[in-house]
Amino acid sequence: MLLRGRILVKDNNFLRFPLEFHVIYQAVSKSYFPHFSTSHYSAVEHYPISGNVSSKQAEKCVDFGRKHDVDVVISKVLEAKSESEVFQSLVHEFGCNKIQITHSSVARLLHRFQDDWKSALGVFRWVESCTGYKPLPELYDKLMDILGKMKQMDKMKALLEEMREDHIISLNTIAKVMRRLAGAGDWKDAVKMFDQLERFGLGKNTESMNVLLDTLCKEKKVEQAREIFLELKSHIPPNANTYNIFIHGWCKIKRVEEAQWTIQEMKGHGFCPCVISYSTIIQFYCSESNFYMVNELLDEMEAHGCPPNVVTFTTIMHSLTKSGDFKEALQIAERMRLAGCKPDTQFYNALIHTLGRAGLVEDALCVFTKEMPQNGINPNTSTYNTMIAMFCHHRKEQQALQYLKNLENSPYCKPDVQSFYPLLKLYLRDGKTDKCLILLDDMVKKHHLSFMLLIHGLCRANNCKWAYQLFREMIRQNIKPKYLTCSLLLKEVKEKNMYDAAEMIEDFMKKMKSS
């Protein structure tokens, strides 16, 4: 979501940049990015990483130290067909002595099987049975979320009861349950969860009320949330976040007038609208390509002493780039400099994307290799993915491979499905099937991205055509996909009217049932 600081790069149709835009970019770069140069930096493998590493990033690095044990478990789990079979195979194969179980390794296993509830539940029951190990409450929450996402509501509720008996339920647990219930269309059950909070050892207060309201608003039940709020506010006081939840909810259902009215209501109750309040409405106008109103709101924010932040500017720049207005997008970077707003990784991702779309490959490369380290900003996986996609579009295969190698060696981030997708697309487009198969093999063996994980990832990224190609490759190599993978892919290809693909998948699923 853009307002949470994530810029999702989807469009790889790079264009040449008119000469006049170079002038704008140079003006921005000289004033905003000190000592900027547009010369080509090829020695990207020596890119200096600077800045502080967060504890979460450090944990990810440490987690790879136990990769071997985790991979052994994964290989065994993939052979099983049910949660009980997963549990039994792990108990009989490993017992509880051969594998070192840590919180990070369990978290990695749950992440690996986040789209496969049977394997996730079977693994979790196995680690629970191991003497001397007790999963953290956060790991229970993760399993709860997996079961809810897979619409296993009875099992999710049963797990919730286990957690209640062990007194390990937090508001975060209830939030996950509420959101999964509402996401499955059972929003009234989500309300019942709020009514039963005391049963789980939790209180009805502003924080828990906001969780309920946020759950309903995210599922577009804004009017119902409003009715509940009017009932509760007499004995549960709202805060600024309560009103921001409604601003986001009204924008989500495209009723921006109510969102603007909520800002006035917010002021009437003594709360000052913050950057989130305004940025939510700005995001709505960006989605409608109404940049006149975007500029009006920017002026209003500054007039009321609520200056835009880096997320606001990044959202606008990305939206302008998506609309093809590269000149205005770069001017937003200049406005951000004048506002004294410091860039972050997501801003640089958007800037690199803008330059790439404009055909300024060398300028984008300089932002990555010079400006980001000069400002102490570390690249993330999305930064590398943007660079790889740009190089592949311009058929710069070796540079794309070099950046993939740099990403593989980075201590701060690792490749995901989207890291490989541009190269796969390039190889398939050029008929280089041998290189395509080598890359696929590398993805599976070196990076432990199974075919099923890749298919799920590509489906989530709206790339079901490539997911179907991988599905066919699985069949060719006699690798049996799980029924869930087939169902997910079938749904996606049907939505894209890929009738031949749908027929092939349905035939395969019938054979799976019969066997």
Image (cartoon, grey):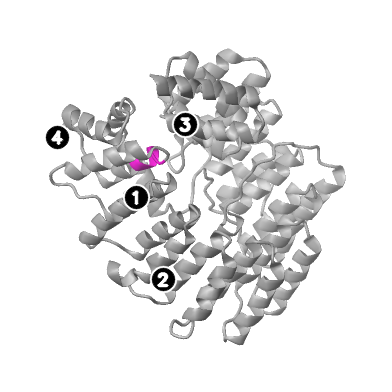
Q: Is residue 14 above or below residue 513?
A: below
Answer few, some or many: residues within 10 Å of disc 4's Cα (few below 14, many 20 plus, some between 14 and 19). Answer: few
Secondary structure at badge 4 equals loop
Q: Amino acid at mark 3?
A: Thr
Q: Amino acid at mark 2?
A: Ser
Q: Amino acid at mark 4?
A: Asn
Residue tagged 4: 97
Residue 154 bears which disc, if any? 1
Q: Nearer the viewer, residue 479 or 37?
A: 479
Residue 485 bears which disc, if any? 3
- In the rendered image, residue 272, in percent from the top left (x then y), is placed at 60, 81
Residue at 61% across / 43% down in the picture?
A: 368
Nearer to us: label 4 or label 3: 3
Q: Nearer the viewer, residue 41 or 497?
A: 497
Upstream in sequence: badge 1 or badge 3: 1
Displayed quadrant of residue 422: top right
Residue 83 bears which disc, if any? none
Nearer to us: label 4 or label 2: 2
Our reading of the magenta stretch's main secondary structure is helix
Q: CA distance from mark 3 to mark 2?
A: 36 Å
Residue tagged 2: 208
Residue at 47% across / 85% down in the picture?
A: 234
